[in-house]
Image (spheres, grey):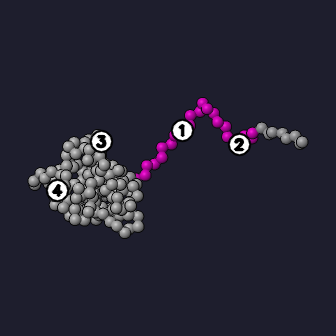
Amino acid sequence: MAKTKTKPAKNRGYKVDDDEPIPVVPLPLDPVAPVRQRDTGMVLDMEGLGGEVASALIVNGLRAYLSVVNKGVNLVACDRAHTAFVPVKIEACKVGLDIKRDEAKPLVEAHGVLAFLLDDGGERWSYYLPAPEFMEMAEDRGESGLRLDVDDHAKWLEKYEGHAGIKRAFAKLLG
């Protein structure tokens, strides 16, 4: 076998002295361009509720299309083949599941779903209720609309909560 010799590292022409401070030269600042503010006058889902429900539907195997109107249906859910559609109305609530009667009535005829996002400040729950069943169970509160008390109907609402609620409320689209 041939012997190989290792050569010492060559000095590349510079010497580093650890005691010598390296001068810091400030770079000139680029002029700050004003940031263009987003025009939120055309955004209909300012709170992101439609995006939240749409994401939950997509995770569970459905297609979701956000509506371009700010009255009535917030999104339309459909099966993967795009052959069956269900209108969805989204409501954000703090105490009970509240909705105006005029907003819920058209969904009964269309066999739509009411998506309630209940927020008590710390936690958030979602309920996906078929509109006809909600109308049967809800309490009529006169001009303030309809309300389904969560505590009074906790046992019944369990099957419509979260992902299980999506699977139950949208069974005809998933089947």
Measured in 3D between alpha carbons, the distance from the residue under mark 4 to the one under mark 3, in whole angstroms, is 24 Å
The tag earlier along the polypeptide, 2 or 4, is 2
Measured in 3D between alpha carbons, the distance from the residue under mark 2 to the one under mark 3, in whole angstroms, is 64 Å
The tag earlier along the polypeptide, 4 or 3, is 4
Q: What is the secondary structure assignment of the residue under circle 3?
A: loop
Q: Position of residue 9 (x, y in %)?
A: 75, 39
Q: Which residue is mark 3?
A: 123
Which residue in the rendered view is the most extreme toward the top? 19
Residue 98 can be seen in this image: no
Measured in 3D between alpha carbons, the distance from the residue under mark 1 to the one under mark 3, in whole angstroms, is 54 Å
**For the residues carrying marks 1 and 2, which lies nearer the camera in this image?**
2
Q: Which residue is mark 2?
A: 12
Q: Residue at x 20, y 43 (%)?
A: 152
Measured in 3D between alpha carbons, the distance from the residue under mark 1 to the one under mark 4, in whole angstroms, is 70 Å
Q: Amino acid at mark 4?
A: Lys
Residue bounds of the magenta highlight: 9-31
Q: Which residue is mark 4?
A: 100
Residue 125 lies in the magenta-colored region: no
